[in-house]
Amino acid sequence: MAELKTKPTGASVKSFLDGVAHEKRKADARVVNEMMERITGEKGKMWGDSIVGFGCYSYTNTAGKDFEWFVTGFSPRKSALTLYIMPGYGEFDDLMARLGKHKTGRACLYINKLEDVDMGVLEELITKSVAWMRKKYGS
């Protein structure tokens, strides 16, 4: 298996967020950045050139290869604000039902704009996701 290309960089999160072209997406990204900082107790770091990650954990994939990844994070992509909920959503069915308008991938939560979701539920989802990850990986 190839090495992961997305790794922590020394790039500035502030500069990255300042450079987001879509003004609403930029404003929403700043809100999510502050929320994730508060929940994790950590400053975000750039992972690759487009993901802001918080925390770090190590895991071994099914091929026995060790990797590091962020505990939670986000990216203000053109198509949607993407939040990374690393345990996925199986543990959080009740929260997902109350969240509001969104789409999901395996560990990705796609939100068009924060007004589409219940911010209290979003914060609870991120908080529980981070707690789950820390319990499982000790990060």
Image: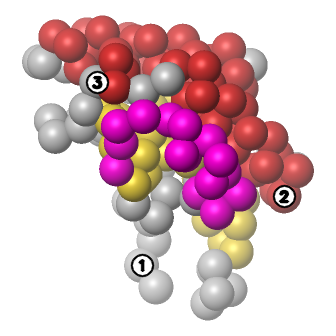
Nearest the eye: 115 or 110: 115
Chain part drawn in magenta: 89-103
Q: Mark 3 to mark 1: distance in Å?
A: 35 Å
Q: Which mark is residue 113?
A: 3
In the image, taking residue 126 as reference, residue 101 lies left or right, namely left
Q: Residues within 10 Å of mark 3 (few under 14, many from 20)?
A: some
Nearest the eye: 96 or 12: 96
97, above or below 20, in the image: below
Disc 3 residue type (three-letter): Lys
Q: Residues within 10 Å of mark 1 (few under 14, many from 20)?
A: few
In the image, taking residue 91 as reference, residue 108 lies left or right, namely left
Disc 2 residue type (three-letter): Lys
Give the residue displayed 35% in from the left and 37% down from the top.
101
Coordinates of residue 129 in the picture (x, y in percent): 69, 44
**Residue 61 visible in rendering:** yes
**SS for callout 3:** loop
Would you name the residue on which mark 2 appears?
136
Give the residue displayed 79% in from the left and 49% down from the top.
132
Q: Residue 68's quadrant in the figure?
A: bottom right
Q: Earlier in the sequence, mark 3 or mark 1?
A: 1
